[in-house]
Amino acid sequence: MSNKPSRHHILHCKKEWRLRPAGNRLRQTHELVPELDTDTHVALHAATSQVPLLAFHSLERVVARFEPVRGDTMATIDGLCFNIAEAVNNPNCRRIEQQMGILAIEAIREQVPFIQQGIIIPRFAA
């Protein structure tokens, strides 16, 4: 198999996350689209679950507070998971909406070992 770099959207499945403008904006966050070596990228998709799209109000709460950590995919993942947890702990959030958020966090966290193994850190010219 080829081991050239490939871009991985942490928030996948594309068709689902593109259904809502807020979801698509979040999905396209630069730090949430790391370059991985192709072998690791293929293994990630074979071994992990898709990240379920958040319920409407949870998604809006996440997008309103989410701040990527520029240039740091792992810190951005941590911040996203924190924002999702915070959004679904809102007193107005229903039980199923909370469970969707918990599942999204679990699906994101499943990817972390693969991302850590296969991430390609860009080299910038001095």
Image: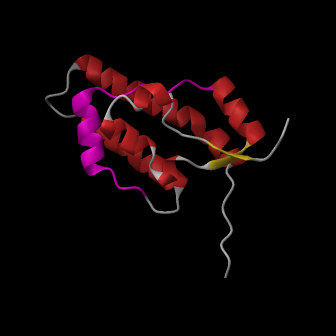
The residues colored magenta run 48-68
Q: Is residue 92 left or right of residue 100?
A: left
Picture residue at 35% right of the left edge, 23% below the top: 100
Q: How many marks?
A: 0
Is 51 a magenta residue? yes
Residue 40 is situated, as x and y percent measured from the top left of the image, at 73, 38
Q: Is residue 123 left or right of residue 109?
A: right
**Res. 81 visible in picture:** no
Q: Nearer the viewer, residue 77 or 121?
A: 121
| Above or below, 101 relative to 86 | above
Q: Most extreme residue toward the left, as rendered?
A: 92
Residue 61 is situated, as x and y percent measured from the top left of the image, at 23, 40
Picture residue at 29% right of the left edge, 45% below the top: 63
| Above or below, 65 relative to 84 | below
Picture residue at 72% right of the left edge, 31% below the top: 43
**Res. 23 visible in picture:** yes
Q: Most extreme residue toward the top, as rendered?
A: 96
Q: Nearer the viewer, residue 50 or 112?
A: 50
Q: Most extreme residue toward the right, as rendered?
A: 1
**Image quarter of the C terminus:** bottom right
Query: For residue 8, what is the image quadrant?
Result: top right
**Image quarter of the N terminus:** top right
The colour scheme used here is secondary structure
| Above or below, 105 relative to 25 | above
Picture residue at 34% right of the left edge, 21% below the top: 99
| Above or below, 81 relative to 88 | below
Residue 37 is situated, as x and y percent measured from the top left of the image, at 74, 45
Is 74 a magenta residue? no
